[in-house]
Image (cartoon, helix red, strand yellow):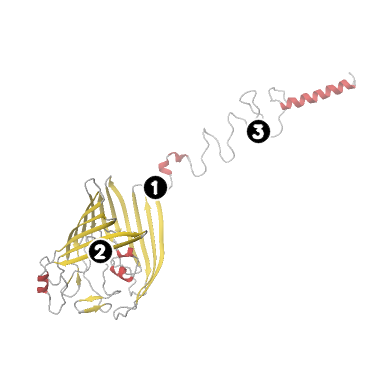
Amino acid sequence: MNGATRTSTACAAIVAGLLASARPSVAADEPPLPPGLEKAKPAEPSEPALPAGLPGSDEPDLPAGLPGGGDEPTLPEGLGDEADGASDSEPLDVQSGLTFDFDGFVEGRFGLRTQQDAHEKDVSIGEARLHLRTDILADAWSARVAADVLYDPVVDRHRPDFETGAGALDLREAWVTFSISDNADIKAGRQILTWGTGDLIFINDLFPKDWNSFFIGRDEDYLKAPNDAVRLNVYTDLVNLDVAYVPGFDADRFIDGRRVSYYNATLGRRAGRDAVVQADRPGRWFRDDEFHYRLHKTVGAVELAAYGYHGFWKSPGGQTPTGRAAFPALNVYGASVRTPLAGGIANAEFGFYDSADDRGGADPFVNNSELRFLAGYEHEIAPDVTLAGQYYVEHMLHHDAYLASLPAGVPARDV
């Protein structure tokens, strides 16, 4: 064979070798794969080998960090096999469905009397207040805790008193509410309660009020003081029923002379810090208790309600023989109506105050029974501008007996 023939034969051999290395490996005498490619048995003879880094198998291995070993990849760290029982392993906020909502504000208020009051300080309020509130929402219940931390140099006492609202801490709310059936709810704990149709006039709303807050210029929300109560709401097609039970009497945070002056009938003059009211409060739980009732229904656009109360006068309604303020027994029965009228809203409310300790009016140291009535109307006279007015009447019963029993020198109340 000459040189040309040998050269052609060598070139053909090189080309054949390159083609052989480019085709899939199908024979036992094929040359080895390049480094990094391990020999693997393909699923079918015609399939190419897997790329470098993926060892051969019926299925490719998972990437680094996700070990194999099953039909499905293992879960990331922190979620093991026990995650199959989701109800046992979910985080608290998922498992129990709890949602927390935090809110609050900081405010300062300052008030200065424009006229001289010999019985009070010139500054009526100099208050710094921090309000904090937490709402907890769950699938079957909800709860709230709200409190105020405050300081006011006008007052002399800073030790907390949750009944009078005095001191550096006032617990406003601490309640839980839940349903006991499809048409009944319960709310238990320290809460703000209200009902009735009056605007800043309360006839059948016998829940406690903070009259000091109102007259020294706090926000209107603070006029309504908290109750320690259990409230039941029942909803039916015929009528709705609300019942509030207060196991221990909650009096008004009444005017006692510490911050706002008042008329002292015994002294026959205006008094204040020089004659602070000392009161005997009913304080026996489950004996000095209160019941509030309301039946209400909406007929078309008309709201109707009937009310009942059994407890005590909310602000002092009498006096002990020693001169201390007293809270005589009281029952109240009333009704209200609210309805659209002439493009506005009209309301009327009535209440009979049954002074259970002096029904005949012969005891000068106990308030007589009374009739109370109000009528109101409001109308929007411009966008976001409402004009409203109310007419209010108190009528003392057995006024003649009251006058006959009044001690000499004590000024008489009006009828």
For the residues labelled 3 and 1, the Cα–Cα distance comes to 48 Å
Crowding near the residue tagged with mark 3, few <14, some 14–19, many ≥20 C-alpha atoms within 10 Å: few
Q: Which residue is mark 3?
A: 51
**Amino acid at pointer 3:** Pro
* Among numbered discs 1 and 2, the one appearing first in the sequence: 1
- Under circle 2, the secondary element is strand
Q: Secondary structure at mark 3?
A: loop
Q: Position of residue 290 (x, y in %)?
A: 21, 60
Residue labelled with disc 1:
97
Examine the image and state in which quarter residue 378 appears: bottom left
What residue lies at 40% left-to-right and 61% top-to-bottom? Answer: 104
Q: Quadrant of the C terminus?
A: bottom left
The residue singled out by tag 2 in the image is 390
Q: Position of residue 184 (x, y in %)?
A: 26, 48
Q: Nearer the viewer, residue 233 or 34?
A: 233
Tell me the mark number nearer the camera, choosing from 3 and 1.
1
Q: CA distance from mark 2 to mark 3?
A: 89 Å
Say which amino acid is labelled 1: Gly
